[in-house]
Image (cartoon, rainbow, N blue to C red):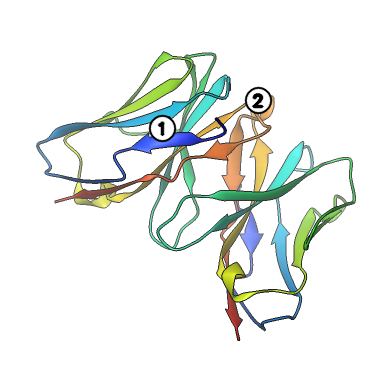
């Protein structure tokens, strides 16, 4: 199937690191993405990683990719209350990789 | 211009109405997408247009009718919708299939 799995909920304190995990389905996916969605809003692209990379760092964000286990993670350093949102991982599937399929979403709650 | 613009932001329509959602981008992207997102769920792909031609229809009911008049514009025509069609409708575009997705902020549709 096309189920991309994420844990439902993560709660951290301000200043801590957050790690959001994702298990995807297709080892041939070329790009894997992380999106952020705040209440009532659209999707904001946070970062992405190409499938031939193991790690990508972008300011407070670190993406780790384990292709063997089809596991993707997003680490947010020094988490702030403004990081509270739903985080979706997504993979590209299908002929020409035209389908962007989203994970189930992880709600991150950052408390002061 | 690095945005995908969707109008209207909110829409309330009756089950006998006909309405249209509009999506516009001026980034030169050649692939455009419609996604549907129900509350507390991930976005689900509805349609993909590649070079102004419909390339993917995810078995969407015919009461939803997409149209791509030119490379910058994507419409979704709505007719005889049901209350369960109430959702956030997201438009996206990408440079090419599988890479560089940009999402609009969505149209929140309520069918009464």
Above or below, A73 against B23 in this view is below
* Chain ID, mark 1: B
In the image, B44 versus A55, the foreground residue is A55
Left or right of A75? Residue A106 is left
Where is residue A96 drawn, in percent x and y? 67, 24
Mark 1: which secondary structure?
Answer: loop
Asked whether residue A108 is in view, the answer is no
Residue located beneath label 2 in the image: A95
Kindly identify which numbered label has been placed on residue A88: none
Residue at 27%, 50% in the rendered image: B86
* Chain ID, mark 2: A
Q: CA distance from mark 1 to mark 2?
A: 16 Å
Where is residue B66 drawn, in percent x and y? 35, 24
In the image, B64 versus B9, the foreground residue is B9
Q: Quadrant of the N terminus of chain B?
A: top right
Residue at 50%, 54% in the rendered image: B42
Where is residue B25 drawn, in percent x and y? 48, 27
Residue at 67%, 82% in the rendered image: A14
- Indicate the quadrant where residue B31 lies: top right
Where is residue B8 drawn, in percent x and y? 29, 39
Left or right of A106? Residue B64 is left
Kindly identify which numbered label has been placed on residue B59: 1
Q: Are marks 1 and 2 on the same chain?
A: no
């Amino acid at each position: 199937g096309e189920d991309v799995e994420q844990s439902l909920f993560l709660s951290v304190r301000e200043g801590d690191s957050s790690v959001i995990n994702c298990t995807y389905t297709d080892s041939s996916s070329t790009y894997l993405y992380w999106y952020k969605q705040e209440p009532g809003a659209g999707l904001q692209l946070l970062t992405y990683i190409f499938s031939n990379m193991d790690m990508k760092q972008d300011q407070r964000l670190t993406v780790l990719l384990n292709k063997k286990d089809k596991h993707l993670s997003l680490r947010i350093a020094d988490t702030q209350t403004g990081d509270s949102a739903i985080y979706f991982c997504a993979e590209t599937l299908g002929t020409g990789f035209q389908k962007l399929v989203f994970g189930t979403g992880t709600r991150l709650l950052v408390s002061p | 211009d690095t945005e995908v613009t969707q109008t209207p932001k909110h829409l309330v329509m009756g089950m006998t109405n006909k309405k249209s959602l509009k999506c516009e981008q001026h980034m030169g992207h050649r692939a455009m997408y419609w996604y549907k997102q129900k509350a507390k769920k991930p976005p689900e792909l509805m349609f993909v247009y590649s070079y102004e031609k419909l390339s993917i229809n995810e078995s969407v009911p015919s009461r939803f009718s997409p149209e791509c008049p030119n490379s910058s514009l994507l419409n979704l025509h709505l007719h005889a919708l049901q209350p369960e069609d109430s959702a956030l409708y997201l438009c996206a575009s990408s440079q090419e299939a599988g890479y560089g997705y940009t999402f609009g902020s969505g149209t929140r549709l309520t069918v009464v």
